[in-house]
Image (tube, grey):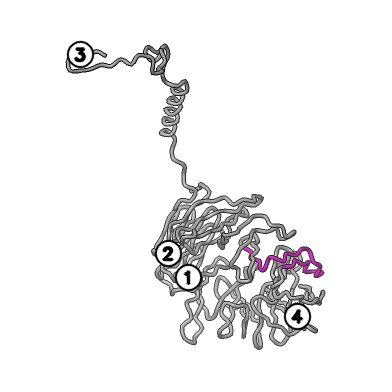
Amino acid sequence: MTVQGDTVVIDLGLERGEPDSYDSPRRSTFPRWFPAAVLTALVLLTAGASVAPAKPVLTEVFSLPIGSADAYAVTEDGRLLAQTFGVLSSYALSDGRTQWDAGHTPPAFRLRLGSGLVLMRPWTAGFREPDTTAISLADGAPRWTRSGSVMTLAGSPTLLAVSFPRGAGGSRRVQGPIDAVDPVTGRTRWTVTVPSSAALMGLPGPGDSGTRMLLVHDDRTMAVHDLVTGERLAVAPVPAADYDASNPVVVDGVILLRHPGNPGMEFSAYDPSTLRNLWSRPADGFSDAVACGVLACLTGPDGMRAIDPATGDERWSRPQWRDLQQVGARYVAFGSAENLRPLGLIDPDTGALATDLTGWRPVIGSGGDGNLLVTRTEENGGRTMVAVARPGERQLRVLGPLPEGTGDCQAAPERLVCRSLYGKLVVWAYGGKG
């Protein structure tokens, strides 16, 4: 012990176990890895500062104000048609550029497209049937107005003016005259009269003859008409049935009708050209038929069975499936008849599950190149996640979340159009393309 002034210094020596080298170390007291770690950290920090942040997969392209009841539509050539507060306008989906404004128009329930026209029919008010106004898709100029509803059949540019029985609006059941409409002048080209009422649908013609008009009358006759002239090409008796929006159905050119038989329900198939009965078989508990590619899928409480529509032969069955929905070019299988539980994307030829969609909902519209957009609301009721199912990929590619309050979406190639609770229609780009 040494006393230096008021300070007492106690020398413990080396007996306490301290190595001699601590007194005068011969090498660095830092670990060998320390300099390399510091250098690596500096390199990463410098590199991170020089690289731009990753571009979000979902980016907003443009938005426009829209009312909750305003209609909008997406065209195949990349346009957004929107009727916002009584004004119909066309926008480029690529950048939001306004292509034309058609001025004030009566509020429409939906925007139908056909023969280069936007067909607008106001909401029904009272007992009078509202008129249909045709507006040019090219420049927004009004073309003509005529009474009744004007529609097209899948695969045909022919415009048909029809009347629906009261309470059957939006279904395929029509009554009275069916007029073929000239898209340029709005005048009637030919007329086919329906004595009472009939289910109306399109029917592919043989070869390249184009789409024909199929009428299933409530007097138990079925007729095929040429859409160019209105001429009746074939007629045949059919069993009594509930002719409605889903019966009969046309699959790969064959007509399938569900009807009462002996002793239970049956399915019957008819040739599209001659209306000759091809086969009839018991329904075996299946209640509906839907097209799944070139096959017909019969659905019911016991599952789903795919058959060849021309022969009725079974191709595959899935007891756990209850319904099927076509979205764009893809087919989604559901585990409940109410379309509440999507199971996945399927290959309609084999019935194989291609992509698992458990917990996701398909978005209407075509994403282009066979892509299917799907959404999922987070469990806490917050934001909506968006993902894309690509052909040949078994796993979904998650794109990211949409802002809270976003819904009612429609897909287009590289674009997603959604309504917002805050009175906006927002167009998003996905896949990193703006």
* Foreground label between 1 and 3: 3
**Residue tagged 3:** 4
- Identify which residue is drawn at 44% across, 35% down: 51
Q: Amino acid at mark 2?
A: Asp
Q: Quadrant of residue 426?
A: bottom left
> Which stretch appears magenta?
304-326
**Residue tagged 1:** 142
Q: Amino acid at mark 1?
A: Pro
Q: CA distance from mark 1 to mark 3?
A: 108 Å
Left or right, 305 with reference to 110: right
* Foreground label between 2 and 1: 2
Image coordinates of residue 104 in percent, x first then y, are 40, 71
The 10 Å Cα crowd at callout 4, few under 14, some 14 to 19, many 20 or more, is: some
Q: Within the magenta stretch, is there residue 307?
A: yes
The first of marks 1 and 3 along the sequence is: 3
Give residue 101's mark: 2
**Residue tagged 4:** 265
